[in-house]
Image (cartoon, rainbow, N blue to C red):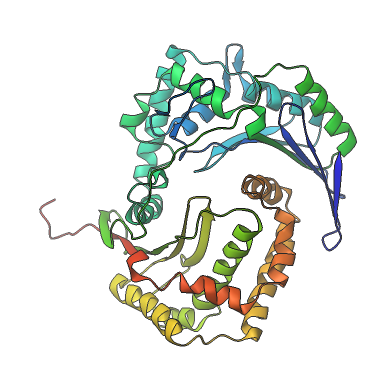
């Protein structure tokens, strides 16, 4: 078992890659009574075209299948897994993102027993055509519910504006039409391909004995039989550099307009330290230009163009990424122009100093260090970094070593207006016939 001590953070991370390919990380936290255990697969909604395990030809599966599979994993022939967790005092959950699916529990007692339940239910699939058909109605209701949420529609509307081909533009849950095509055979095909231990990671954080936990997981995995590990071949369409739509809007039942100004990233086929430095550089650039201490923010706030819903951030994964600046607003057109003007002005003359950079990086480091007091935050973030060949605990030194040149270079990618888009949700027109 490998041990890595992060002196600055006073944390020791334990790691081992098991013979079946499963990666196990354990982070003991002193002073905590709760333990969080996550079991994640590098498989999300964008993984719709791939070569199934044991086959030669690529298949395209219905949209929403990763999320559908997550739902079905909790249902077993002997009953619902949630009941097993609750009987042992644990709270269980799961979520699917664009790039991964995570199953988790938290508990203060019976941690090993709950870990056994987690490992077993994720590694023992049970699907029938009857239960699959039953689930379609449940997920269709969930999709319909999200369709009625303006903030969700705003977020996905902005992504749909940016991407013409990449499946990130497709809702994680799919559509009512796409999930209706899902069969039990689809689920087994995706499960057998993406839920192999070699594509998965266990992360344990909290009140845990690392040697005891590692030995327990190793013994559990050694008692199970798996196919030999194979590299998964995934396929993604070639995406154009420009956005799919420069501007679109949608009428919904809202009090005032909602806007997202999106900027599509193109430097996305990177991973590891290169990805970490680029991501942090972009986040710092956005904070300097559009953060709550920026002159832009003070201007639009004082002019009543934004409210407490305002946000500005950059996020990315391998293959896609975007900046989103958004708020509820009384004047979407004026706010759009202000955002665009701020980018143009700083493109002509970079107005930030090393003192500004130090201020923003210190702020981000402070936020990060506070977040490390939350085992929920660590559990949710660690695997995302790991799947991108990054380490969560490299964030602080990377921020400390960030240069203004890196930030300016990241900002340069924001200047191309062909990567800019605006998506707006507006109140229903009371004068229309509808």
Image quadrant holding the N terminus, namely: top right
Question: Image height check: is 243 above or below 148?
Answer: below
Residue at the image position 62 percent from the left and 60 percent from the top:
274
Residue at the image position 52 percent from the left and 87 percent from the top:
351
Front-most of 384 and 378?
A: 384
Residue at the image position 81 percent from the left and 32 percent from the top:
109
Residue 224: horizontal and vertical position, in percent? 73, 17
- Report whether residue 140 is seen: yes
Front-most of 417 and 305?
A: 417
Q: In this view, does 425 lie to the left or right of 399?
A: left
- Report whether residue 209 is seen: no
Question: Image height check: is 119 above or below 425?
Answer: above
Q: Is residue 302 left or right of residue 358?
A: left
Front-most of 22 and 153?
A: 22
Residue 363: horizontal and vertical position, in percent? 67, 72
Q: Is residue 157 left or right of residue 265?
A: left
Residue at the image position 36 percent from the left and 50 percent from the top:
153
């Amino acid at each position: 078992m490998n041990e890595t001590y992060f002196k600055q953070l006073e944390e020791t991370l334990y790691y081992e890659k098991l013979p079946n390919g499963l990666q196990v990380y354990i982070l003991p936290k002193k002073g905590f009574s709760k333990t969080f255990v996550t079991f994640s697969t590098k498989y999300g909604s964008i993984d719709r075209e791939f070569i199934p395990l044991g086959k030669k030809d690529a298949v395209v599966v219905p949209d929403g299948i990763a999320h559908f599979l997550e739902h079905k994993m909790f249902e077993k022939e002997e009953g619902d897994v949630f009941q097993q967790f609750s009987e042992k005092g644990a709270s269980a959950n799961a979520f699917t993102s664009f790039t991964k699916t995570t199953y988790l529990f938290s508990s203060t007692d019976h941690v090993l027993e709950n870990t056994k339940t987690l490992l077993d239910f994720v590694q023992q699939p049970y699907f029938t055509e009857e239960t699959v058909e039953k689930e379609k109605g449940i997920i269709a209701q969930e999709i319909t519910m999200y369709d009625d949420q303006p903030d969700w529609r705003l977020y996905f509307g902005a992504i749909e504006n940016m991407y013409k081909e990449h499946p990130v533009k497709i809702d994680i849950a799919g559509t009512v039409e796409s999930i209706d095509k899902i069969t039990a055979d689809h689920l087994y095909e995706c499960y057998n391909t993406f839920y192999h231990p070699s594509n998965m990671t266990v992360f344990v954080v909290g009140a845990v004995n690392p040697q005891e936990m590692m030995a327990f997981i190793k013994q559990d995995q050694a008692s199970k039989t798996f196919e030999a590990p194979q590299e998964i071949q995934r396929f993604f369409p070639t995406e154009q550099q420009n956005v799919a739509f420069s501007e679109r809007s949608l009428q919904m039942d809202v009090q005032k307009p909602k806007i997202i100004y999106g900027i599509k990233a193109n430097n996305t086929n990177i991973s590891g330290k290169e990805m970490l430095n680029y991501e942090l550089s972009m986040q710092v650039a956005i904070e300097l230009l559009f953060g709550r201490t920026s002159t832009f923010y003070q201007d639009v706030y004082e002019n009543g163009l934004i409210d407490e819903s305002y946000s500005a951030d950059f996020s990315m994964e391998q293959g896609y990424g975007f900046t989103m600046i958004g708020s509820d607003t009384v004047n979407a057109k004026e706010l759009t122009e202000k955002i665009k003007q701020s980018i143009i002005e700083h493109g002509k003359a970079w107005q930030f100093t090393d003192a500004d950079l130090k201020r923003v990086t210190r702020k981000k480091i402070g936020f990060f260090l506070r977040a490390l007091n939350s085992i929920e935050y660590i559990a949710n973030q660690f695997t995302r970094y790991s799947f991108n060949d990054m380490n969560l605990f490299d964030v602080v030194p990377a921020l400390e070593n960030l240069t203004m040149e890196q930030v300016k270079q990241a900002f340069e990618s924001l200047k191309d207006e062909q990567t800019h888009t605006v998506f707006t949700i507006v109140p229903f027109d009371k004068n229309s016939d509808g």
